[in-house]
Structure formats: C-alpha cells, structure tokens
Amino acid sequence: MGIQNSENRQSTKKQLWQYPWDYKESAIISFGLLIVGYLLQITTRTSIKAVGAPINYFIGAVFIIMLLLLHFFYRNHPWVKWLRSVPASVSAITLVLIQAILMGTLPQQNFVEGTKPDLFGFSFVLSSWPFIIAQFYFLTTLGLATLNRMTPWQWKNWGFVLNHLGLFIAMTAGILGSGDLKRYTMDLYENQLVWGAKTEKGNQIPMPIAFELKSFDMETFAPKLALADITTNNIQTKGVNALRMIEKGDHYDYKNYKIKILDYLENSKFTGNGYFQVNEEGAAPAARIEVKSATMDTIAWISCGSFATQYSYLQLSEKEAIVMLQPEAKKYSSHVNVYVKDGKNESAVIEVNKPYKVNGWKVYQLSYDEKFGKWSKLSVIEIVSDPWLPIVYCGIFMMLVGAVYLIFKGKGTAL
C-alpha cells in the first residue's frame, strides 16, 4: 500500500512548465530576459537615449492601455495570471536588483557620441538594454498585480493599492520624464546680462530667462596649517593635529614641533616686513606663528596667498615645511537681477542648496572661479526643468502612506 501511494505521488508531481507556473519557471523566464537584453546590447553596442514629449506621452499611454486590456479582457489567461503572481514579481525584482548592483559596484560613465561603448553596457547601466527590459518586466508585473487588487474594489485593499500604485506612478514617471529633463549651466559675469545657456556638450542655446550678476559673495572657514613634504609636495594628513584650523592664541604639538599662533589676519597683503590687514581685492589670510623643536626656535609669517598676494611658508628642514592651506568655502551665493521675456523682472539671491524658482525652472548655485576665490567675478549657475518631478513625488507620497498603513495593519493583525 505504501509503495502504491509513493507511485501516485510521483505521478502527480508537478512537471516543469506545467500550469500554474511557479518560482522555477519565473526564474527561467527572467534569466531568459536577461540574456535577451545582453544579446541586444552586444548586437547594437549603443546607449538608449531618453525620448521627450510627445513621444514619451505616447509610449506611456500605450503601456497603460496594454495593461488595462490585459487585465479586463485577458485576466484569466495563464500568462496574465502568472504575470501578476508572486513568483513573477519576485523574479522581476531580482532582475532589477541585478542591474542596481551592477550600477552601484561598477563605475558609470556618460555615453559620449563618437566613442565605442563597452560590450555589455556595464558603464552605462541606466541606458542599456538589460536595464530597460528589467524595468519593463517589473512595471508590467507591478501594474497587473495592482489592477487585480483594484477591481473589484474592496476597501480592505486600499493600503496595498496605494503602496503599489504609488511605486508604479513614481517609477513610470521617472523613466518617461527623463527625456523631458533639461539641465543647463550659465556663466554669469558682473554687470553682464546673459540670455544664453550651455548644454552638457558645451553648445549655446537661447533661454527665456536672463540673469545679471550684481555681486558674488563667499564666506570661508579659517584656513588650516599643515606639514608638507617639500620634495614631493605632499601634505601630511595623519595624526590628530595634522590639519589644524588656525585660531589666534592656539598652541599645539605635532610630531616633534610645538606650534603657536601668535596672530591671524583674515585679509592681508605682504609689504616687505610682513603681512598687514587690508580690505582690498586679492587680500589673503596670513598668520604669524612660533615653532619650537629640539633644534629650532622660530617666528615667521606664513600665508596661503592669492592671485594678488604673495604666498609664503616656513621651512623647517631640507624636507619639511609648515604651510597654510587655502580656506574652504563655508557658503557662497550670487546676487542677481532676473529678467523674463513676459516682462517679469526681480532681484534674487541664489545660494548653494537653496534653489531659486522662476517660470518652471529651478536655479542652483553651482560654482565660481576658484583661482580668484571670494574675489571671483564669475558665478556659474545651473538651471533645471523637470516637469515630471511633481508626479514622481506624488507617487512616492502614495507609496509611503500605503506602506505605513500596511505596517500598522500588520501589527494590529499580530496583536
């Protein structure tokens, strides 16, 4: 009798590709999609460029209509039932994770026209065929699973639907909206009206907004003292006091030297006998320091210098010297006049991490002329237009609300 039951179990054991498909079939399909993606990448050897309006609108509409047709007219088809199943979802997530791991572990480079990309697209994962196929597969399973919970509607499913629909909206909008993202830079010089911007390739394009730089302001930290190797021009960074911020009256030990800051001038110029406080363009920080060791007892002025001020350091031996490093920027901003073609004119301050918004554009403080530092007459700003960003944020918000509900629902169920 036991032998007969064993034979019955063997005869009823599910065969590969026997419906309903499970994790084995899902893994094989996802692996096949990965192979197809790399075969396409090897064949085309190209980077897939993002498309803008109206093509991205058309692609998005076709994709959503396809999901709706599959759900409402073919929802009982074996393929559709499998696509919205948990095994298909897990395999799709795995496929996306593989691309994410590749992108996070391998150096990514922008694809430049005229250069030959690597064979498998590892250096530009986001615009490679395997990534596009993985995203399409994942969004298809996500969309069908969400629609399956939405119809017929039951209020008990609203957390799941909000979470998954939010993820679907955020990812779809992020992919489709990449073609409408515009990112340019503008070089602003004092008292010059600038209407044109530069693309990543350096091409000049006209803009509907103009900026006139009135002044560039920068606040800096106090510079640091460091021990340098004169023979190699290397700065020593090991040790607690290797890079010590200058403060008048401060004294400390580093290696075999006792160092004391006797005086510090934030803006100074060299006048023959030393550095003196001035308020002129090109003034640089300077410090009068005392250095003692077993073989020396010296007082001297040192300065990091500038385009208009002499640089100086204190040599301690044939190999070592104490130098002042250039001060690091604490905060910098541009005071500008803004002119828009519709007649809107206003003054604004553009700061780092505080974008200025005008006519659908976000304006960021990007950089300046580092040679002149806080005396720079050049301010580089970045102007960005991303019309799909509010949709992405909306999707993320929906996803978070749904996730919070599901977490609390799970806790309540457990209790």
Image: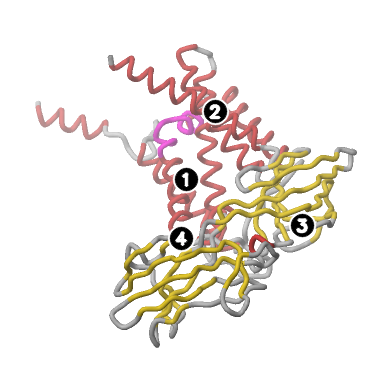
Residue type at tag 1: Val
Instruction: Tell me: 189 left or right of 319.
Output: right
Compare marks 2 and 1 and give the one earlier in the sequence.
1
Q: Depth-wise, is mark 2 or mark 1 nearer the camera?
A: 2
Marks 2 and 4, how far apart in space?
A: 50 Å
Which residue ends up furthest to the top in the rendered image? 155
Residue 62 drawn at (x, y percent): 68, 35
Compare marks 4 and 3 and give the one earlier in the sequence.
3
Residue 260 drawn at (x, y percent): 39, 67
Determine which residue is flagged by label 4: 248
Residue 34 drawn at (x, y percent): 47, 51
Q: Are marks 4 and 3 in contact (CB under 8 Å)?
A: no
Q: Are marks 2 and 1 in contact (CB under 8 Å)?
A: no
Q: Depth-wise, is mark 1 or mark 4 nearer the camera?
A: 4
Residue 71 drawn at (x, y percent): 57, 25
Compare marks 3 and 1 and give the one earlier in the sequence.
1
Q: Which residue occupies 39% across, 35% down?
A: 87
Relative to 348, is 302 above or below?
A: below
Q: Which mark is residue 96?
A: 1
Do we see residue 179 in this rendering? no
Relative to 14, is 131 above or below?
A: below
Q: Depth-wise, is mark 2 or mark 3 nearer the camera?
A: 3
Residue segment shown in magenta = 79-90
Which residue ends up furthest to the front in the rendered image? 273
Q: Which mark is residue 188?
A: 3
Marks 4 and 3, how far apart in space?
A: 37 Å
